[in-house]
Amino acid sequence: MTALAKGFDRLAPIYDSLAQLVIGQGIRTSQLFFLHHLAQKQNLLILGGGTGWILPTIFKINPTLQIDYVELSPKMLAKARLNAGGNRNVRFIEGTERNIGNSKYDCVITNFYLDLFNNEQLYPVVNQVKESLQPKASWLATDFSSERKWHKVILWIMYRFFSLATGLTTSSLPKWEEGLKRAGGKLVETRKSKAGFIKSVVFDF
């Protein structure tokens, strides 16, 4: 197990509560904005899904959706299995985008995942995920935005916290939306919340 996985294992029992305490309920609602895009999809990849609290909502929108759920932390993955409630349409994978194999997907979700990488790491990660997408696939992403001074202050505090708590080496928010565009994604929808601190997008590839 990597040091980062061990770090997130330590946070697993309090991760969702901590996120809502710091950011508020908007950290969850922002991830639900564009789930209607999943209604006609068949194969979904979720990267860095954490505790899987979102899975029951996805099941309601598309009960037949086949999901590969990828998470680095074993304890987060264990919580996600519980939240899946025994749904057999979900395959749980311990790891990262490097562990998805040769599967092909018509949709991918990266919620608060791309912020784990610096700008140098970002494009190779996005490009690797892109190689696993079918033509006309959708990419749903929700992550932080740094548009105002107070955004930058909170992000500085958050990155310092995760550096100490998990060993995360990334120290600032990457240009994740630009990375999706650079990889050939076409922006379809966008929505901001928490006074612009959180941004949700849908890209077509």
Image (tube, grey):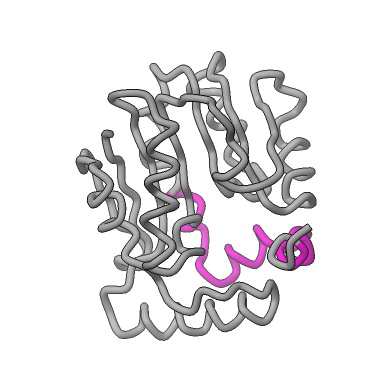
Q: For the point 32% across and 73% down, which residue is it?
A: 146
Determine whether, in the image, residue 142 is placed left or right of residue 27. left
Q: Quadrant of residue 17?
A: bottom right
Up-down: is 45 above or below 110?
Answer: above
Up-down: is 99 above or below 44?
Answer: below
Up-down: is 180 above or below 17?
Answer: above
22 within the magenta span = yes
User: Count the marks: how many?
Assistant: 0
Q: For the point 46% across and 63% down, which residue is it?
A: 115
Residue at far top of view: 64
Determine whether, in the image, residue 133 is placed left or right of residue 6. left
Q: Nearer the viewer, residue 164 or 122?
A: 122
Q: For the point 30% across and 23% down, which residue is it?
A: 135
- Of the 4 image quadrants, the one containing the C terminus is top left
Q: Which residues are magenta?
A: 6-30
Q: Quadrant of residue 198?
A: bottom left
In the image, residue 126 lies at what x, y percent? Answer: 39, 49
In the image, residue 102 lies at what x, y percent? Answer: 54, 27
- Of the 4 image quadrants, the one containing the N terminus is bottom right
Q: Quadrant of residue 194?
A: bottom left
Determine whether, in the image, residue 178 is placed left or right of residue 173. left
Magenta stretch, main secondary structure class: helix
132 within the magenta span = no
In the image, residue 30 lies at what x, y percent? Answer: 42, 50
Q: Nearer the viewer, residue 177 or 142?
A: 177
Q: For the point 47% across and 47% down, which residue is it?
A: 110
In the image, residue 49 lies at what x, y percent? Answer: 59, 46
Q: Nearer the viewer, residue 70 or 63?
A: 70
